[in-house]
């Protein structure tokens, strides 16, 4: 996207040299300058359509992967903040000299935060009456 933006600048500067009509030149420069943005919007719209088809599928393998990712995040959080500390507490009470290390969450947290953000957006839609 950045490379495309760097290429567009010089091209829009050259248009006025080849197109004599100033209005036509400005229109072409604007069209070229917004080309990358339109392309990104088209890609996003196509992904939204794919998401709709996936979500409507009756197959668990197609529509169930998002909930599965959510449950994996829930299990990871539960393990790190409830199961492992409790297990370490019990091991210490039993005088067993073993400590279970916590799982590093730095790779899971961006996924979890993204899913929570999408959930919040969906809740906001429901309060505004946009939900189906």
Image (cartoon, rainbow, N blue to C red):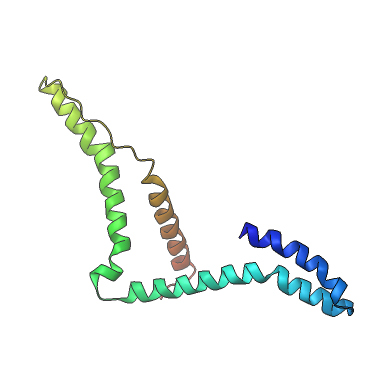
> Is 74 above or below relative to 103?
below
Front residue (pair 29, 71): 29
Q: How many labels does the image show?
A: 0
In this view, the residue farthest toward the left is 94
> Residue 41: horizontal and vertical position, in percent?
57, 70
Residue 54 shown left or right of residue 58 in the figure: right
Q: In this view, does 10 lie above or below 52?
A: above
126 or 60, nearer to the observer: 60
Determine the residue positioned at 70% across, 62% down. Answer: 7
From the viewer's perspective, tell me whether residue 127 is left or right of residue 74: right
The C terminus appears in which quarter of the rendering? bottom left
**Residue located at (57% from left, 67% from top):** 40
x, y percentage for residue 19?
A: 85, 78
Q: Can residue 130 be seen in this view?
A: no
Location of the N terminus by quadrant is bottom right
* Residue 82 placement (x, y as % from top left): 24, 38
Q: Can residue 91 be seen in this view?
A: yes
Q: Tell me: residue 99, above or below residue 65.
A: above
Q: Residue at x 13, y 22 (%)?
A: 93
From the viewer's side, name the closer residue of 95 and 24.
Answer: 24
Q: Residue at x 30, y 61 (%)?
A: 67
- Nearer to the camera, 28 or 116: 28
Q: Is residue 14 left or right of residue 101?
A: right
Give the vertical position of 31 relative to 99 (above or below).
Answer: below
- x and y, in percent, of residue 118 in the image: 43, 59
């Amino acid at each position: 996207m950045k490379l495309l933006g760097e290429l567009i600048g010089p091209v829009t500067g050259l248009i006025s040299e080849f197109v004599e009509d100033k209005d036509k030149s400005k229109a072409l420069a604007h069209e070229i300058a917004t080309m990358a943005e339109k392309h990104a919007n088209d890609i996003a719209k196509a992904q939204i359509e794919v998401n709709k088809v996936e979500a409507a599928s009756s197959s668990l393998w197609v529509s169930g992967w998002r909930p599965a990712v959510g449950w994996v995040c829930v299990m990871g959080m539960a393990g790190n903040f409830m199961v492992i500390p409790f297990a370490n507490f019990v091991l210490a009470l039993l005088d067993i000299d073993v400590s279970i290390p916590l799982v590093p969450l730095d790779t899971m947290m961006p996924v979890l935060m993204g899913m929570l953000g999408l959930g919040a957006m969906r809740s906001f839609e429901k309060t505004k009456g946009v939900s189906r």
